[in-house]
Amino acid sequence: MTKRKIFGLPFPVIAALLGVLAALFIIGLLAGPIGRGLLEQFGIKITFPSWLVVAQPAPELPSATLFKLFGLPVTNTVLAAWFTVIFLVVVSYLATRRMKLVPRRFQAAFEFIVGWIYDLCLSVAGEKNGRRFFPVVCTIFLYVAFNAWLSLIPGFGSVHIVNAEGQTAELFRGANTDINTPLAIALISFVFVEFYGLKSLSFSYLRKFFNFGRFFQGLGQLFKGKFDFMGMFSGVIEIVIGGLEALSELIRNISFTFRLFGNMTAGEILVLVAAFLVPLGVDWVVYGLELLIGFIQALVFSGLTLAFVTMAVVSHDAEAH
Amino acid sequence: MDVNAAKMLAIGLVMGLGALGPGIGIGILGYGAMQGLARNPEARGPIMTNMLIAIAMAEAVAIYALVVAILLGFVFK
């Protein structure tokens, strides 16, 4: 009989692994509040060790101010954002210190990440524009992704300090969970899109939003003696469409902000709640989901910025109307 | 109906109804991606990338509902 291998490991190893996972799940289920309620109904009283009992999570949406610097409040999310920035700068410096043409492992890993984002820029925006848009898009991707990933390091939310008013707060909290960070990145992407739109097409870029040409054309026909009803009608419709486009540009900021904020905050609350409900059994699954979600949200933010700026620099006449 | 009961009802309804549309939308997106992948397995890269972006857009609507539910639960006492 040929030995069956699942995922590259022989069958008894997989069976043992599944058994360990099932045991962890059952222990976790019993130690959490569900199991304790169930055991109380049967009258069994087991005192679990303190490392297995998790306190009920009390998530707070606004982040706690830790101290004031030059009169501006510094919250725990700001500290986490500084940590991300320092981490990225140090890693980039170490990766490019002695660059070789045939890279070794660390430089090669960094080249893989940056090269992947560069290929994404080229594939969406084309050759020339891809190179122009690459810095901002790559910065947005790396900032959002590493904010999300670094907040998953064990111990990130566990260290508490007491701030000036005497409240205990976490020292670090993921920077994307504060609504200011997604709002800031969304505003930067808005300015980026408008800047490149205006730069490429100069002021005729605004014709996308204020499209009075057709209407005044129809109005001009009136003076020639012809009542061009269809022209004026479609002119009015084009004005309304232009207004809707302008509105949708502004609404995109809100949608960017709440997409990132909602995903990250919901993920943080989910990790806390999963650790509370089933302590050992399920929280590593939620952790893996959070890693994936961080990557996907970074990809979506930077990819959408790239798509919008590509649409903005395309000349308006080139589109088939 | 007192205020707390109404609040609990509102939180449940917001999240429940708000996840209906995006769930169906993401399913339709997955269906389209599977069909495209079955017809042309070589185009796996672009198909998966575009599917992820489209799923994240649909997911965002569910996240708006989640934000309203969290706001109702934790911010409005």
Image (cartoon, rainbow, N blue to C red):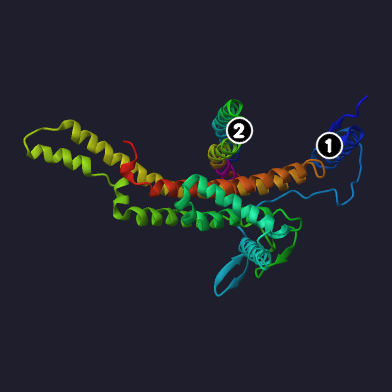
For disc 2, the marked residue is: B42
Q: Is residue A258 above or below residue B2?
A: below
Q: Main secondary structure of the magenta part?
A: helix
Name the subunit of mark 2: B
Q: How far, Cα to Cα, is label 1 from label 2?
A: 26 Å
Decide: is B62 above or below A2.
below
Q: Nearer the viewer, residue B53 or B2?
A: B53
Compared to residue B55, the image places residue A126 above or below, namely: below
Question: x, y percentage for residue A62?
Answer: 59, 56
Q: Secondary structure at mark 1?
A: loop
Give the residue displayed 67% in from the left and 51% down from the top. Answer: A59
Residue occupying the point 60% across, 53% down: A115
Q: Amino acid at mark 1?
A: Gly
Q: Quadrant of the N terminus of chain A?
A: top right
Q: Is residue A146 left or right of residue A247?
A: right
Front in this rendered view, residue A275 or A188: A188
Crowding near the residue tagged with mark 2, few <14, some 14–19, many ≥20 C-alpha atoms within 10 Å: few
Residue at image mark 1: A8
Left or right for A117, reference A268 = left
Residue at 29% x, 40% y: name it. A240
Res. B75 visible in picture: no
Check the image and name the residue furthest to the left: A225
